[in-house]
Image: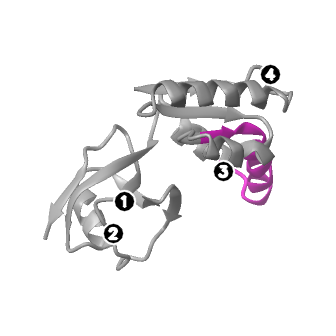
Amino acid sequence: SHAIVLAGDQLNPESDHHTLAVVLTLEKLRSDIITTAECVDPEHIELFNRAGCDDVVCLAQMSSNLIVQETLDPGVQRVLQEITSNTFGQQVYVVPIEAIEPPVFSSVCAHFADKGVLPIGLLRDRKARLNPKINEEVSVEDRVICIAGSRPGPVSYRA
């Protein structure tokens, strides 16, 4: 159901061509598969998206961003290390919305209020919308970005 395609050489942007070929092959053989690919050159991200890759991780881009962020706000790296680990502490989860009434972000917050889950945003049309306003409209097509100690179930809330 899922495929992770790693770059052959994380230091060589040319390895993106091989990774892209693997993604294209997987998508042609099984269009229903969820593919996550490692991209070396940030300029190639759009090519992966056009090839049908569901998610693209560009470590070079992330590491540059992280170095700048850590310089401006020391401690960010430790926070990100914990929330991106799947072995300790709190992690980031993206969970579906099955039902939500009223259809606003405050209803999402109310759903998780006593569950030890911190909703931090929405994933909509493959874009993260972090820290939305409390009255931001949500729908069952959105997914909730949250931080928790274990994977929370889907949102199903009616006030």
Residue 74 on the magenta segment:
yes
Secondary structure mostly seen in the magenta stretch: helix
Q: Circle 1: is it few (<14), some (14-19), or many (20+) Cα within 10 Å?
A: some
Distance CA(mark 2)–CA(mark 1): 6 Å
| Magenta range | 56-76
Residue tagged 4: 9
Distance CA(mark 1)–CA(mark 4): 35 Å
Of the numbered discs 2 and 3, the one sitting upstream in the chain is: 3
- In the image, 76: left or right of 33? right
Q: Residue at x 30, y 66 (%)?
A: 139
x, y percent for residue 27: 52, 31
Residue tagged 1: 142
Of the numbered discs 1 and 3, the one sitting upstream in the chain is: 3
x, y percent for residue 57: 64, 39
Of the numbered discs 3 and 4, the one sitting upstream in the chain is: 4
Q: Are marks 2 and 1 in contact (CB under 8 Å)?
A: yes
Residue 57 on the magenta segment:
yes
